[in-house]
Image (spheres, rainbow, N blue to C red):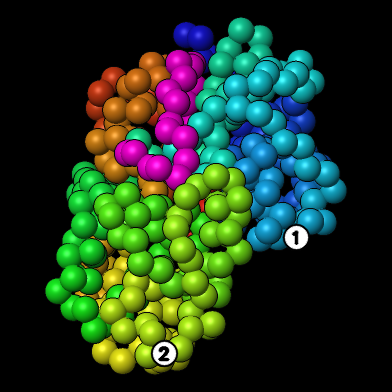
Amino acid sequence: MRSDGIDRWLYPTPRGLYCEPADAYIDPASAVDRAIITHGHSDHARPGHGAVLATAETVAIMKVRLGEEAVGRFEAAPLGTVLHIGGVSVRLVPAGHILGSAQVVLEWNGQRAVVSGDYKRSADPTCLPFEPILCDVFVTEATFALPVFRHEPAASEVARLLTSLRRNPDRAHLVGAYGLGKCQRVIRLARDAGYDKPIYLHGAHMAVTELYQNHGIALGEIRAVADTKPADLAGALVLCPPSAVSDRWSRRFPDPVTAFASGWMRIKGRVRQSGVELPLVISDHADWPELIDTVLETQAEDVWVTHGRDDALVYELTRRGLKARALALVGFEDEGE
């Protein structure tokens, strides 16, 4: 098997997944000398590294979220460009998760491993689509790796949101959405569906949204809630961190329609726990069928499953005759969901 022996040069450590001949970690959980970062969410992109290799968009996101001096040195790699690090050929290809997200393709001694980072397969007008790569070992996430998770088309969920806005013209709609990726995707989908009014943002969402606009993502007129009179927010579309939907910040909106955009809204218990009126099943991760289809598309002989519901995915892949195992890497959460 071509995958035999890859775990001698690519393997998990307490700091994260380590490529020994390149002396580099992929999305390490703590500071290292050299890190390759798949995307800008905080459970993958951390400060303190000596050097970071990532896409230009991810570098920009890290600088905005963590600061210009967050790491010793940033190196922006164009997608598809092959770099040679310690004899290892390294290239980044689109992952379809958020702006700048990338899979890491590692080739050494005639073997190829692909580390997916987080990814999705559904269309997203704010980032490049996932690019499947044939490989010997595929390292996949498993955030929604249970058969119950079958995401709705995001455009259909945003259509439900806009319908509610039309039916409740005097009620602000507060949409809890994570600030990097989900927020901008919901905005763009609303614009694509014809919504042309100003969209209002919690202050925590402003900087990254401006970054998206600076990278050519058309989001229309964006206003800060803090700069707006409460009377002007009646019937408005407002995006905020999920925690803000029910905290003191939301009290400025009389009788709002509360919503939460997340793949977790597929689960009734999570909907009850969130307490929102309008659950929106919008995810930036692959669902169960997409995870299975993606693994099969890579034609990998060996599949390594990182964060998420790894046991179910390992079982299903093994049942299908593939070699699969859980890596049990630490430090990953659901920051992007």
Name the foreground residue: 283 vs 170.
170
**Is residue 255 shown left or right of residue 333?**
left
As displayed, is residue 296 above or below residue 61? above
Q: Tell me if mark 1 has few (under 14), some (14-19) or many (20+) residues whose alpha carbon lies within 10 angstroms of its own.
A: few
> Residue 126 in magenta?
yes
Residue 14 at x, y percent in the picture = 65, 47
Q: Is residue 142 visible?
A: no
The foreground one among 251 and 42 is: 251
Horizontal side of 272 relative to 63 (left or right) equals: left
Residue ID for mark 2 = 230
Which is the main secondary structure of the residues drawn in magenta? Answer: loop
Identify the residue at the far left of this view: 167
Secondary structure under the numbered disc 1 in the rendered image: loop
- Picture quadrant where residue 53 is located: top right
Residue at (27% x, 40% y) in the render? 288
Mark 2 or mark 1: which is in front?
A: 2
Residue that badge 1 annotates: 67
Q: Which of 273 and 79 is in front in this view?
A: 79
Badge 1 amino acid: Gly
Residue displayed at 55% across by 52% down: 212
Circle 2/circle 1 CB separation < 8 Å: no
Amino acid under disc 2: Pro
Q: How far apart are marks 2 and 1 (CA)?
A: 32 Å
Which residue range is magenta in the image?
122-143
273 drawn magenta: no
* Residue 105 seen: yes
Number of numbered callouts drawn: 2
Question: Could you say where residue 108 lies in the image, as x and y percent from the top left?
Answer: 66, 14
Helix, strand or loop for disc 2: helix
Front-lying residue, 65 or 141? 65
Quadrant housing residue 125:
top left
Left or right: where 38 falls relative to 98: right
